[in-house]
Amino acid sequence: MPRFLIALLLSTLCLPAAAATPQISVGPLFDYLEPTHSNLLKRIRNTGDATAYVRVEVTQMHFDAEGQASETPVDGAALVRNAPGAHGVIASPSRLIIAGNGQQATRLVYRGARDEERYYRLRFIPVAPSAEEFSLSEEQAQEAAELNASIRMFTGYGTILFIAPEHAHYDTRLQDGRVYNHGNATVVLDNLRQCERARPDTCTPGIIVHVRPGRSYALQLADGRFLRYDLKEGDSQRGIDSRR
């Protein structure tokens, strides 16, 4: 056998097998807690072929007059003991062990006053686990050690949770190419598309837009096109077609 074929065969046999890795999917990037609910179930899937160890972190989002967001940590300990004036979201459990091609769920619970709308960022972060943090069995600890040895970089995923006020009211106005929100809860422009007037079924990919209370959004429209979207106000939804 020619030497170069022998070398090629040996190099192929020596290639390491692809390491098994977790790959999580967090589902919808936006979740909404309506006034009649205090919690919701968030399902996290692992489409990879190795166990995923996921830490859930929660921060509250604050918006300034220009709409720029900042974040502050949620005092989970104060929420657990129902401290006076405390408000925020608890993720229970906040540590998930998700088998390959499996799923787990965490319950997002809001505690505190609902006098105004609030916003929370949830981060689902795959981590190299420790036995103490995840309360691992001996078998799981061994698997985790192998995972730690083969994987050094993980990707986290962020979602946003909208907490509607207790007495939500909606006052949405469409004027001069803008959507104005005069209510006290966010309205959603879902599947917002520009479609060709000559070919109404030919549209741009849909996007989602959130218009927070007291804010407005300018509807961009190119010549020869019209807009289609679903206007969502809490549980209510209606289709909008700018030709009408």
Image (cartoon, helix red, strand yellow):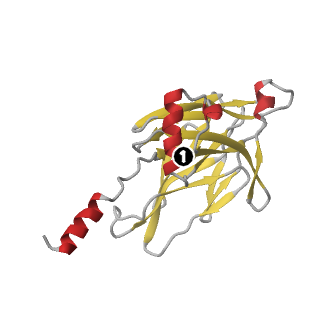
Q: Nearer the viewer, residue 221 or 4?
A: 4
Up/down of 179 relative to 171, above or below: below
Position in image of residue 54 (x %, y %): 57, 40
Q: Is residue 87 left or right of residue 100?
A: right
Q: Secondary structure at mark 1?
A: helix
Left or right of 84: which side holds 199? Answer: left
Label 1 neighbour load within 10 Å: few <14, some 14-19, many 20+ = some
Q: Residue at x 41, y 45 (%)?
A: 48
Q: Which residue sits furthest right? A: 84
Q: Position of residue 202 (x, y in %)?
A: 35, 65
Residue at image mark 1: 148
Image quarter for residue 79? top right
Which x, y percent locates residue 74?
Answer: 76, 39
Closer to us: 155 or 159: 155
- Residue 87, located in which quarter of the rendered image? top right
Image quadrant in which the N terminus is located: bottom left
Q: Residue at x 44, y 35 (%)?
A: 99
Residue 28 shows up from this direction: no
Residue 103 drawn at (x, y percent): 45, 34
Q: Amino acid at mark 1?
A: Asn
- In the depicted view, which residue is nearer to us: 177 or 130? 130
Camera-side residue of 227 and 139? 139
